[in-house]
């Protein structure tokens, strides 16, 4: 079904959405929900609102009612689907094993057929999903522009002139913690192939990501250097693209599949043993490529080959951490989970690594498994809910008395930097990616 281009009437557009959802929502997954409510305490939006319809159980009930033809989808239905952060914490609490993230994506794919009513949301979706993320060279140009903005003194001028006051508060605060962008990514800096140090353990394809390679290029470089230190040959395929996670989570299913096809071909051609990601959001999407091509006779086998090889950087480093030349770092450190790394990939190695690093005092963060409120571009589209979740998180962060907050996803890292600033903790603690902290310790 093609997207609804024109708006004959809002009712007609919603009728088309209803027809699409009745054909595509997975009835088995919806029926598996036992309405037990175990998911409620795990859901950030339910905890903030106390509303049943803002919980996984409530949203599944709404989806099933639409699929059964009991209710028609409307703006209120779309609002509840879009209010969800997609953190998938409910999946780990669900005794029936409902794959909530998948039916949520199906619901959003249907809603995406109808143009959003908000001009801001429409503009953001078009900018990010069509004009930026799929095009690496445009992201490079954006990185060049952001780097020029900082280095030319334009940023100082904008702040001094008061122009920033024209923007909403959350955008002003996020601009203040934005890292320096780069127009040279990891491949441009280190080359396409890096030879291992010591006995080779295997050939790894590095997934560089889109935002990751512009705003966190040094983290990508540190990831490659760590793998080399750990004995892996590192290949960085030039033709790889955005993972498609943001597209899939926003209902842009066909765009996500186009990006996935390109990535599968790029890494299969590189003949790698593993495909490594250093971003939880990207990694969880890469693992699920096989799900997106289920039943596709042309792509399913290649997608399975790809998904079976995806690993987070922490999984490969944990295997050889005792062989890494790590010096003592005397720090009190805590860890904020990336939701998709924990709930999507079920990766547990980061804590183990932090506990084994010489000199580190690890302290567990209360509710570290609760979403930080970043969730892709959620902190832009739902800033108030995002701030509510973040501010509560920072109370727990402050209680750890840690001087380093570690995470494993670029969105979480930016959100944590924002939270540290909002909580007034920037003079006593910092947020870093696990790969960067490990490279600080490598002698």
Image (cartoon, rainbow, N blue to C red):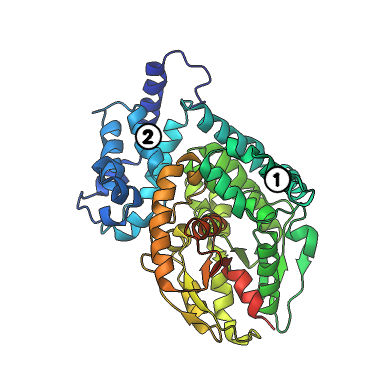
Q: Picture coordinates of residue 43 (x, y %)?
A: 32, 52
N-term-proximal mark, 1 vs 2: 2
Q: Nearer the viewer, residue 230 or 149?
A: 149
The residue beneath circle 2 is: 79
- Residue visible at 42% across and 72% down in the picture: 400
Q: Can residue 340 be seen in this view?
A: yes
Is 34 placed left or right of 141 in the picture? left
Extreme residue toward the top, this view: 8
Around disc 2, counting alpha carbons within 10 Å, would you say few (fewer than 14), some (14 to 19), or many (20 or more)? few
**What label sits on residue 403 in the rendered view?**
none
Q: Picture coordinates of residue 175 (x, y %)?
A: 61, 48
**What label sits on residue 139 in the rendered view?**
1
Q: Provide the secondary structure element on which disc 1 rests.
A: helix
Q: Is residue 130 above or below residue 393?
A: above
Numbered disc total: 2
- Residue visible at 42% across and 14% down in the picture: 9
Q: Nearer the viewer, residue 202 or 352?
A: 352
Is 46 placed left or right of 129 in the picture? left
Q: In this view, does 155 lie above or below 426?
A: above
- Residue visible at 30% across and 59% down in the picture: 93
Quadrant housing the C terminus: bottom right
Q: Picture coordinates of residue 236 (x, y %)?
A: 72, 61
Q: Provide the secondary structure element on which disc 2 rests.
A: helix
Q: How far apart are marks 1 and 2 (CA)?
A: 30 Å
Q: Are marks 1 and 2 in contact (CB under 8 Å)?
A: no
Q: In this view, does 328 lie above or below 423?
A: below
Q: Nearer the viewer, residue 272 or 342?
A: 342
Is 214 placed left or right of 1 in the picture? right
Q: Which of 192 and 47 is in front in this view?
A: 47
Q: Picture coordinates of residue 160 (x, y %)?
A: 68, 44
């Amino acid at each position: 079904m093609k997207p609804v281009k024109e708006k004959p009437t809002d009712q007609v557009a919603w009728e088309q959405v209803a027809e699409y959802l009745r054909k595509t929502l997975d009835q088995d997954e919806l029926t598996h929900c036992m309405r037990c409510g175990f998911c409620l305490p795990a859901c950030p939006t339910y905890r903030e609102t106390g509303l049943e319809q803002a919980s996984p159980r409530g949203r599944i009930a709404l989806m099933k009612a639409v699929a059964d033809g009991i209710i028609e989808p409307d703006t209120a239905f779309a609002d509840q689907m879009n209010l969800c952060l997609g953190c998938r914490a409910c999946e780990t609490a669900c005794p029936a094993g409902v794959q909530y993230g998948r039916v949520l994506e199906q619901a959003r794919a249907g809603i995406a057929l109808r143009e959003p009513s908000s001009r801001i949301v429409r503009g953001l979706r078009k900018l990010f999903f069509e004009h930026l993320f799929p095009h690496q060279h445009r992201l490079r140009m954006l990185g060049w522009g952001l780097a020029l903005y900082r280095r030319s003194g334009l940023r100082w001028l904008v702040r001094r002139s008061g122009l920033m006051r024209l923007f909403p508060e959350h955008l002003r605060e996020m601009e203040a913690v934005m890292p320096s962008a780069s127009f040279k990514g990891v491949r441009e800096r280190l080359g396409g192939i890096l030879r291992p140090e010591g006995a080779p353990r295997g050939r790894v394809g590095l997934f560089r990501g889109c935002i990751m390679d512009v705003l966190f290029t040094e983290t990508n470089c540190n990831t490659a250097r760590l793998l080399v230190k750990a004995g892996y040959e590192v290949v960085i395929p030039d033709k790889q693209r955005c993972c498609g996670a943001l597209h899939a989570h926003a209902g842009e299913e066909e765009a996500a599949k186009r990006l996935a096809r390109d990535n599968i071909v790029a890494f299969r051609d590189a003949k790698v043993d593993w495909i490594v990601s250093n971003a939880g959001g990207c990694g969880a999407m890469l693992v699920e490529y096989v799900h997106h091509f289920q039943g596709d006779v042309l792509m399913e086998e290649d997608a399975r080959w790809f998904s079976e090889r995806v690993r987070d950087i922490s999984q490969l480093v944990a295997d050889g951490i005792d062989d890494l030349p790590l010096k003592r770092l005397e720090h009190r450190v805590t860890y904020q989970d990336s939701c998709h790394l924990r709930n999507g990939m079920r990766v547990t190695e980061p804590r183990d690594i932090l506990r084994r690093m010489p000199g580190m005092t690890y302290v567990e963060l209360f509710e570290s498994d609760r979403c930080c409120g970043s969730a892709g571009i959620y902190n832009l589209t739902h800033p108030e809910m995002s701030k509510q979740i973040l501010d509560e998180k920072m109370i727990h962060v402050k209680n750890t008395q840690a001087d380093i907050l570690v995470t494993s996803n670029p969105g979480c890292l930016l959100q944590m930097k924002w939270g540290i600033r909002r909580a007034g903790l920037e003079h006593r603690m910092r947020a870093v990616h696990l790969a960067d902290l490990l490279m600080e310790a490598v002698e």
